[in-house]
Image (cartoon, rainbow, N blue to C red):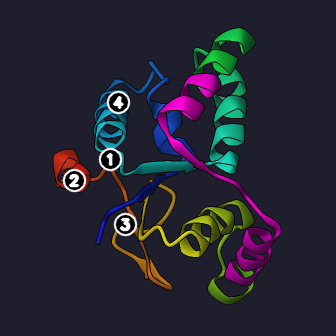
Amino acid sequence: MRDRILVDTNVLVYAYDRSEAPKQQRAVEVLDLLIASGKGVISTQVLSEFFNAVTRKIRMPLTIEDAMASVENHTRAWRVLDVTTFIILEAIRGVRDHQLAFWDAQIWATARLNQVPVVLSEDFASGRTLDGVLFVNPFADGFEPAAWAT
C-alpha cells in the first residue's frame, strides 16, 4: 500500500535547482502530485537539509529570505514528521546493520518508524526494500509520477 510516501531532500531541492532543468521539471511534477493527493510527507530533517542545500549548494542559490519562505510554505503543504530520539537510535541501527550513511539511515528510520512504506530519493538503490521500506528513484527511466500519487 502506498498511502504515504516520504520525499527525501534531493527531490525537494531539485524543484528549486534551475541548473538541472529535466530534474527540476520532474521534481515539480512529483511534488505537485503528492501534495494534491495528500500522500506526500517530509521530515524535519528534510526541511533542514533543504534550507542548507538551496542557500549553499545549488548553482543559483536562494536568498535566506526566499529559502525561509519556501520552508514555511512546505510546512503548510506537507505533513511534517519529527525526528525523534527513537528515530536517531533506529538510524544508528541502520548504519550498523545495513551499512547506510547516517543521514540516509535517518531518512529510512523516519519512514520505518512512522510506517511510511515508500521513500522517493535518488540516494538509495531504486527498488531496494529495507525492513519494509521501498526506495524509489523518481528520476529513473520508467518512473511514472501519476502512478505513485493515485
User: Does residue 127 appear left or right of residue 143 in this picture?
Assistant: right
For label 3, the SS is loop
Is residue 58 in view from this perspective? no
What amino acid is at disc 2?
Phe
Q: Residue 29, position in %: x, y? A: 28, 33
For residue 128, what is the image quadrant?
bottom left
Which of marks 1 and 4 precedes in the sequence? Answer: 4
Q: CA distance from mark 2 to mark 4?
A: 14 Å
For label 4, the SS is helix
In the picture of the structure, the residue carrying the numbered disc 2 is 143
In the picture of the structure, the residue carrying the numbered disc 3 is 126
In the picture of the structure, the residue carrying the numbered disc 4 is 28
Q: Main secondary structure of the magenta part?
A: helix
Q: Residue 91, position in %: x, y? A: 72, 73
For label 2, the SS is loop
What amino acid is at disc 3?
Ser
User: Does residue 32 appear left or right of residue 79 in this picture?
Assistant: left
Q: Is residue 125 above or below residue 50?
A: below
In the picture of the structure, the residue carrying the numbered disc 1 is 139
What amino acid is at disc 4?
Val
Pointer 2 with pointer 1, Cβ within 8 A: yes
Q: Residues within 10 Å of mark 4 (few under 14, many from 20)?
A: some
Q: Residue 77, position in %: x, y? A: 48, 32
Which stretch appears magenta? Answer: 71-94
In magenta segment, residue 86: yes
Which of marks 3 and 2 precedes in the sequence? Answer: 3
Q: Is residue 119 above or below residue 9?
A: below
For residue 63, what is the image quadrant?
top right
Pointer 3 with pointer 4, Cβ within 8 A: no
Please name the residue shown 33% across and 43% down the image. 34
In magenta segment, residue 87: yes
Q: CA distance from mark 2 to mark 1?
A: 7 Å
